[in-house]
Amino acid sequence: MSKGSNDFTIAKALRYKRYYLFAFATIFTLVLPWIKVNGNHFFLLSFDKLQLHLAFVHFDMQELYLMPFLLMLIFLGVFGITVVGGRIFCGWLCPQTIFRVFYRDLIETTIVGLRKSIKNKQAEPDMSLLKNKIKKAIAVGIAIPLAFLAASDFLWYFVPPEDFFNYLSDIQNHWTLFGIVVGVALFLLYDIIILKEDFCVYICPYSRIQSILYDEHTVMALYNPHRGGDIYNEHKDKVFTKQKDLLALDPTAECTTCQSCVTVCPTHIDIRKGLQLECINCLECVDACTTVMGKLGKESLVVWSSDYEIIDQKGKTQYFRPKVIGYIVLLIGISVILGMMGSKKEHMLLNINKENRLYSTKVMPSGKVKVNNSYVFLLQNTELETMKFYFDILPPKGMEGKITIARPTKAFTAQPGVIRKKIVTLSTTEVLVNNSIKDTVIPITIHAYALDKNGKKSEKVSVFRKSSFMYPKESVLEHAK
């Protein structure tokens, strides 16, 4: 089998692999919101319940310090992919591209036959014909429920499916949710039917960012002018439209000027013109040229490679260069930090504030002076079930057992997701410090914990908080007597 025939087979494989990836991404995003582990989703940013679910662990809004790291991971990941493979994300994973391919290639071309061929994405159907209008109406009719499904799937990452359908069944109290679903669906329909690839060319900011990230080793779809010949001059003006004119000037030129790489381009560019911001690296042109040249027993003139290797011909593309290694190190570092911070999730949130009054004193029947310190505990149960909570006081060494809990005297109940306010009073009748000059700040640690079904301390739902106990000076104690 010739080299060209191998390329023809590869072209087919690339095209189908892209479709398979689209199908996998679609199924994955549709199914993922329905998967729960211990009641938690893989990813859910719930503004309704003020929670973030990440990797089947839920965090409350007070724990959203994870979000900046998650956003950095996403943006650095996309930037790193761009440095290595250009706009490969746009052509292979971007939802805009997937929606557009589904509508144009599957619905308009394959199902209703409005377009004649998948290979020609630039020839618009004649809409003056009645049959084409009917086909267009059918295509739009198929796209409408799919748009609403996509809009719902998008919102499932903010409103979980178990709540989403309950809310929609009560539209009168959830008009906002219903309006967002309709708005997103209408935007998708406008995007894939009217705006089309103009979104990629004129609206998406990614095409502008890519020019900053590219370097000579960035891999992208490139036309090889050294083999195919220069179709455009240095001013980017098209010089040749026919093969005979090209061969007259350059007899070694292999480009057949068949325009297959042009007509198949979804963003309506000519890859032979060189690097253009509109190119989304979908590699449709690579497939088209590989198919044509494969029939001639030759290698494709449009390849997925770098300027360094194809245009400048300086050598092989360097994938692991300093810039790429830098991105890898940053991504690994942020992932480690995110994993470490996520693994330290607290299963209860506790904020302790001392009351404005430093302390109060009371003389006991025994003649001893009782010193009270009051605190406001703000506790939130971040588990999914109602639990009972209590706490211990851990004073400095030598003061064990001398500071006791005056109130509450027993464990209290906290509902999941609800902030519970509790007034706590600590007291002592012991002489903790002899200081005739000033009040003494005694550092203490408060160990708050949940009680399990057997009434024992839970090792999982347990937190420690630093606080202080104010002990009065001698004159205050004498005056209290």
Image (spheres, rainbow, N blue to C red):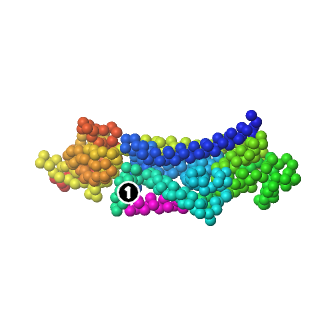
Q: Quadrant of residue 174?
A: bottom left
Q: Residue at x 68, y 40 (%)?
A: 10
Label 1 sits on what residue type? Answer: Leu
Query: Residue sitting at 64 percent across and 45 percent down?
Result: 15
Relative to 87, is 235 on the left or the right?
right
Q: Position of residue 472 (x, y in %)?
A: 25, 52
Magenta-span inclusion, residue 16: no
Q: Quadrant of residue 50?
A: bottom left
In this picture, is 184 found above or below 390?
Answer: below
Would you say residue 119 is visible in this rendering? yes
Front-most of residues 248 and 176? 248
Circle 1 SS class: helix
Q: Percent position (x, y) of residue 124?
A: 65, 60
Q: Nearer the viewer, residue 26 or 337?
A: 26
Residue with the mark numbered 1: 168
From where the camera sits, is residue 474 visible? no
In what quadrant of the picture does the N terminus appear? Answer: top right
Which residue is the extreme one toward the left?
Answer: 365
Segment colored magenta: 174-190
